[in-house]
Every structure is written in structure tokens, then in C-alpha cells.
């Protein structure tokens, strides 16, 4: 049996983003991003920043004509700006993990981009915050139930969520391990 908590089922961009604020939707967020050519998505590790960024990229691709989209991803293993990176007037950058770059590389990159939405853990003081992700237990339960409706009772899910300190990614890793060690009958 396939473990429903394998990363191929819940990795960035595979599950829809769930907003924690009432009234906020992908449409309202897209409209807000139109008013701010440079903006940021802020939040702690594993709170859905990358998922939200990828969903916003899909919105831009479906709603914007004649625009070039570039997605840049930085993490602990990948901290290099592509050497062939170009900057054009009709280009929008979606940069995931900009804080992984050195200060000077970050400055160099952001100073050349006319339109950019990037993810960070701590807000960059001079850039408008497009959205601040906030992990919530209720969202975690909805995501778990979407992947496996009958997997674990809520008190056990609460323990896993609390052990991960609200980091959905770490909680899903633990759910994967639990599923591997306790396959359904």
C-alpha cells in the first residue's frame, strides 16, 4: 500500500494553500499583488510559504498575457544565483527562500528585479508583506484528512502537530514514518 504521506502527495504545490484569515482568498491576494510590484510572503518554516508562492504563480500564468515568469528556488543546498539570469521589463520573478542568499547577493538580485514576490522567514523591512502564513492546527487536520480521511484520531494528530511546533513539513514527515511503521490492516 502507498503511504499517503509520501512527499509526492504533500510537497510544495501538490496541496492547495489554506488561508488562515477569514475573507482572504487567492483572488484578493492576487489583486493585492497587482498593487505592489515588489512584495513578500512571510512565515515560519513549514507554514505553506512555498505552496502559496506556487499557487500565486499559477494565478499569474492564467491571468497575465505577454509576461515572462521566472521561478527561483534557494535552500541550504542551493544558494547560487543562476549565471544566465536576465532581467526584462515584462518579467515577474517568484523567488522561494531569498533569505538563503548572502546579504549582498540578495541586495544585488532584488535591486535588479522590477516585479518580484519572494518568501522569507522574517520580513524585509522596506518591502510590503503580501501575506503572512500562520500555521494552525485546524488547517493541519484538514490537510491530513484530505490525504487520508481515516488516518489517526485527532488527539494523536494534536500531539504530532505540537511536537513539530506547527511546522507542517516536519509533522508530515512524522506522519509518513508513522504510516510506514503502522501500515493499515
Image (cartoon, rainbow, N blue to C red):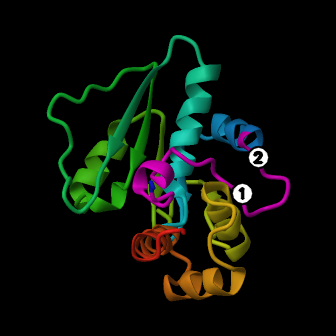
Location of residue 8 in the rendering, given as x and y in whole percent from the top left corner: 42, 49
Location of residue 81 in the rendering, given as x and y in whole percent from the top left corner: 21, 43
Q: Quadrant of residue 20?
A: bottom right
Q: Can you say which quadrant of the picture contains the N terminus?
A: bottom left
Residue sitting farthest toward the right: 23
Q: Earlier in the sequence, mark 1 or mark 2?
A: 1
Residue 68 shows in the view: yes
Looking at the rendered structure, the secondary structure element under dot 2 is loop
Classed neighbour count for the residue bearing mark 1: other residues with Cα under 10 Å, few (<14), some (14–19), many (≥20):
some
Range shown magenta? 3-26
Residue 74 inside the magenta-drawn segment: no
Residue sitting farthest toward the front: 185
Q: Residue at x 54, y 69 (%)?
A: 185
Residue 8 inside the magenta-drawn segment: yes
**With 166 as the anchor, is 23 left or right in this view?**
right
Vertical placement of residue 123 versus 84, above or below:
below
Residue 39 shows in the view: no
Location of residue 182 in the rendering, given as x and y in whole percent from the top left corner: 46, 76
Q: Residue at x 17, y 28 (%)?
A: 84
Q: Which residue is mark 2?
A: 25
Q: Which residue is mark 1?
A: 19
Classed neighbour count for the residue bearing mark 2: other residues with Cα under 10 Å, few (<14), some (14–19), many (≥20):
some
- Badge 1 vs badge 2, beta-carbon distance below 8 Å: yes
Amino acid at each position: 500500500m502507498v503511504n499517503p504521506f509520501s512527499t509526492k502527495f504533500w510537497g510544495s504545490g501538490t496541496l492547495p494553500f489554506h488561508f488562515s484569515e477569514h475573507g482572504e482568498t487567492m483572488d484578493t491576494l492576487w489583486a493585492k499583488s497587482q498593487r505592489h510590484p515588489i512584495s513578500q510572503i512571510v512565515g515560519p518554516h513549514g507554514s505553506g510559504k512555498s505552496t502559496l508562492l506556487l499557487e500565486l504563480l499559477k494565478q499569474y500564468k492564467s491571468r497575465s498575457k505577454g509576461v515572462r515568469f521566472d521561478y527561483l528556488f534557494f535552500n541550504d543546498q542551493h544558494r547560487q544565483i543562476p549565471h544566465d539570469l536576465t532581467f526584462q521589463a515584462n518579467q515577474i520573478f517568484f523567488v522561494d527562500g531569498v533569505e538563503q542568499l548572502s546579504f549582498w547577493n540578495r541586495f544585488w538580485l532584488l535591486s535588479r528585479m522590477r516585479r518580484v514576490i519572494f518568501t522569507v522567514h522574517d520580513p524585509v523591512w522596506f518591502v510590503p508583506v503580501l501575506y503572512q502564513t500562520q500555521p494552525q492546527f485546524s488547517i493541519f487536520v484538514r490537510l491530513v484528512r484530505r490525504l487520508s480521511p481515516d488516518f489517526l484520531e485527532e488527539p494523536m494528530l494534536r500531539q504530532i502537530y505540537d511536537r513539530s511546533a506547527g511546522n507542517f513539513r516536519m509533522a508530515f514527515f512524522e506522519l509518513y514514518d508513522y504510516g510506514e511503521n503502522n501500515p493499515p490492516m
